Amino acid sequence: MPHASPITTDVDFARDGKQFGHLAVPQSTNSAGWAKCLVPITVIRNGDGPTALLFGGNHGDEFEGPVTLLNLARRLRPEQIRGRVIMVPMLNRPAIAAGTRLSPIDGVNMNRAFPGHPGDTITGMIAHYVSSNLLPLADLVIDIHSGGSSMHMLPSVNMHRLENQPQMERMLEAAHAWRAPYIFLYRDVAGAGLLPSHAEQMGKVTLGTEMGSKAQFGVETLGITSRGVDNVLHWAEILVEPPPTGGSGAASQVVEAGDESDYLMAPTSGIFEPLQELGDQIVRGQVIGRLHDIERPQQPPEEIRTESAGILFARRSVPLTAQGECLAVITRVVDPVSTKS
């Protein structure tokens, strides 16, 4: 038997219409022994049909998801859909309020906390509620991310390579429906416990995104995000009418970074000087940047050479870099047929 969650909500997931409410997460703070952290949730339902579960703000320094879903929650009317749309625009609300990747309350990364536990600190408690109460309702799961404060990213819809071929094919269909410039097949190189990984393991059609970065936040990335959510809701036969603008018109390019060597980590600390831009074609052994030692300025900078070839898909956006932090990601174009194992 799963453990019951201490989190409560004032929305009724089975009721038709539109409801704005909260997930009430119990807290005890220095200023209030008895308190609740209120995480906004919106439920829009119109009869029977599929359920889409949409998340933003999994990381608190990524704002494309919160803005897109807050706009969608206000704009979308029950008569425009068939089935149900559940939106949690600021999943890690304490981190969103602080503008930090990790929760300022417990220092935990929400996207490493799944499936969570009801007895965890606030982040794991929310992850457990999502795992046990929200994900089982969903047919389609979307978790909107960007590169946040530390990485510039090419706009993409993301997923893992799955052994379940019917599920993988459905996810690729959904990803192509988004009409983002890229579909990015990635691997977990910084720990387990991701929300998309957990949803995939539950057999859900699951899409993540990397919509640029905090520094790239603007009309273009917000447009790709907002139009894409509408497109996928229509693909899932939840949004009844097709969106007025479907995307750029060009088909998404499928790329993959499947090897550990595709993720370049800083061998030492210093100031990162990029020498290549996003989208550049990179050959194996190419110098894509240099790390300058701030404590020994007389020393020549450390050259960062690639161990694989392909497209420079992501690079560090913050010059000051600590040893072990990600500097760049190299991807290769793959034929969609080759994504079948």
Image (cartoon, rainbow, N blue to C red):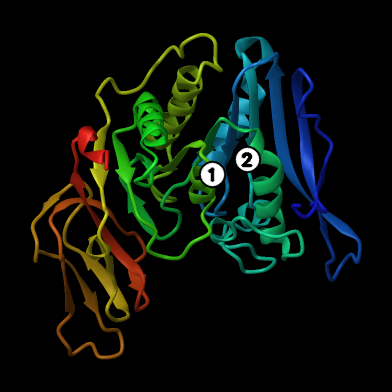
Instruction: Measuring from the top left, give residue 270's x and y in whole percent.
Output: 30, 79
**Disc sitting over residue 199 in the figure:** 1
Quarter of the view holding residue 67: top right
Q: Which residue is mark 2?
A: 135
Instruction: Measuring from the top left, give residue 177's x and y in whole percent.
Output: 38, 24
Mark 1 crowd level (few <14, some 14–19, many ≥20, 10 Å Cα): many
* Picture layout, residue 104 above or below residue 221: below
How many dots with numbers? 2
Mark 2 crowd level (few <14, some 14–19, many ≥20, 10 Å Cα): many
* Separation (CA) of disc 2 from disc 1: 7 Å
Q: Residue furthest front?
A: 1
Question: Would you say the residues marked 2 and 1 are in contact, meaning their CB atoms lie under 8 Å apart?
Answer: yes
* Picture layout, residue 321 above or below residue 328: below
Quarter of the view holding residue 41: top right
Instruction: Measuring from the top left, give residue 234's x and y in whole percent.
Output: 48, 17
The amino acid marked with disc number 1 is: Ala
**Disc sitting over residue 122 in the figure:** none
Q: Is residue 204 left or right of residue 271?
A: right
Precedes in sequence: disc 2 or disc 1: 2
Measuring 23% from the left and 87% from the top, which residue is drawn there? Answer: 297
The amino acid marked with disc number 2 is: Leu
Observer-nearest residue: 121 or 197? Answer: 197
Q: Quadrant of the C terminus?
A: top left
Q: Is residue 220 left or right of residue 39?
A: left
Measuring 26% from the left and 40% from the top, which residue is drawn there? Answer: 339
Measuring 68% from the left and 56% from the top, which residue is drawn there? Answer: 94
SS type, badge 2: helix
Q: Is residue 34 left or right of residue 258?
A: right
Observer-nearest residue: 190 or 49? Answer: 49
Q: Is residue 327 left or right of residue 48?
A: left
SS type, badge 1: helix
Instruction: Measuring from the top left, give residue 317's x and y in whole percent.
Output: 34, 59
